[in-house]
Amino acid sequence: MSTEARLREQICLLAKSMFDRGLTGGSTGNISARTEDGGLLVSPTGTSFGRLDPGRLSRFDAKGVLIGGDAPTKEMPLHSAFYDTRSTAGAVVHLHSCHSVAFSMLPEVDPDNFLPPLTPYGIMRLGKVKLLPFFLPGDPAMGEAVRGLAGKRSAVMLANHGPVVAGKDVEAACNAIEELEDTARLALLTRGMHPRALTEAQVQALVTKFDVEWDD
C-alpha cells in the first residue's frame, strides 16, 4: 500500500471513530491532511464522517488545484488559512461537537483563551484557543479571521458552530480536537461549582516543559 493510500485509510478511520462516538453528526465536520508531494486530501462536501470513501476524497496538488475525487468541503477557506499561516500544519479538523459549541455560547467565556485550564493535556495539545465570532457556514471570512491570527494559534472555536484544530499530522489534529471537546465538557459539568483549575504557575510549568505555544 502506498503512503497516500495509507493516509486515505487513516483519514476515513479516524473520521468514522469520531462520528461513531458522537463528536460530529449527520454530514457535519470536515478533515484534511497534507500529502507527501505537498498536496491535500480533503473530505468532500456534504459527506458524513461515518461513511467517508478513501477513493473519493478530494485531492489537491501542491498548487491548490483540485486534481481528483469529489468536490471538497465548502469550508476550504478555513483549512487553507491554517496551512498558509502555520508551516507545521500537516492536518486540519473541524467538528460540530456539542459541548464545545454549548460552551461557546456562554457570556463569561474569554474570547482570547476559550478553555479554562482544567487539565494538563488541554494546555499541552491546544495552547490557547481563540474564540472567533459567528460566521455563516462556508463564509470565506472565517478563513480571513484565522489568517488574522498570523499562525499564532493551532486551534480556534467558531462561536455557535464548532472547533477547528491544526496538528502536525492527522492523528495529532484529531487527538487535539477531542481534547478540546473534553475540556469544554468538563467546564460545563463543573460550571457554578468553583472547580480547582490549574494555577498560573502550573500552567506556566506545562508551557515551559512541553514547549507549548502560549504567548499571543
Image (spheres, rainbow, N blue to C red):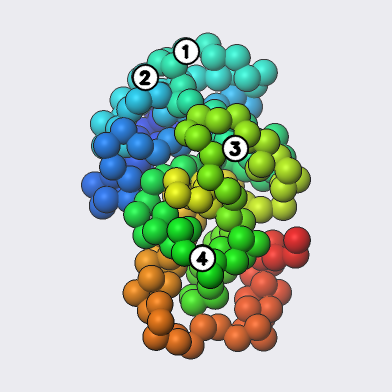
Q: Residues within 10 Å of mark 2 (few under 14, many from 20)?
A: some
Q: Which residue is mark 1?
A: 68
Question: Residue 131, percent across and down?
Answer: 58, 55
Q: In this rendering, is residue 213 above or below 39?
A: below
Please identify, in this view, whether the residue under mark 4 or under mark 3 is nearer the observer. 4
Look at label 1 and name its amino acid: Gly
Q: In this rendering, is residue 47 above or below 134?
A: above
| Label 3 or label 2, whichever comes before in sequence order | 2
Please identify, in this view, whether the residue under mark 1 or under mark 3 is nearer the observer. 3
Q: Which residue is mark 4?
A: 107
Q: Which residue is mark 3?
A: 142
| Label 1 or label 3, whichever comes before in sequence order | 1
Quadrant for residue 148, please give it: top right
Look at label 4 and name its amino acid: Pro
Residue at x 39% of width, y 59% of height: 102
Q: Residues within 10 Å of mark 1 (few under 14, many from 20)?
A: some
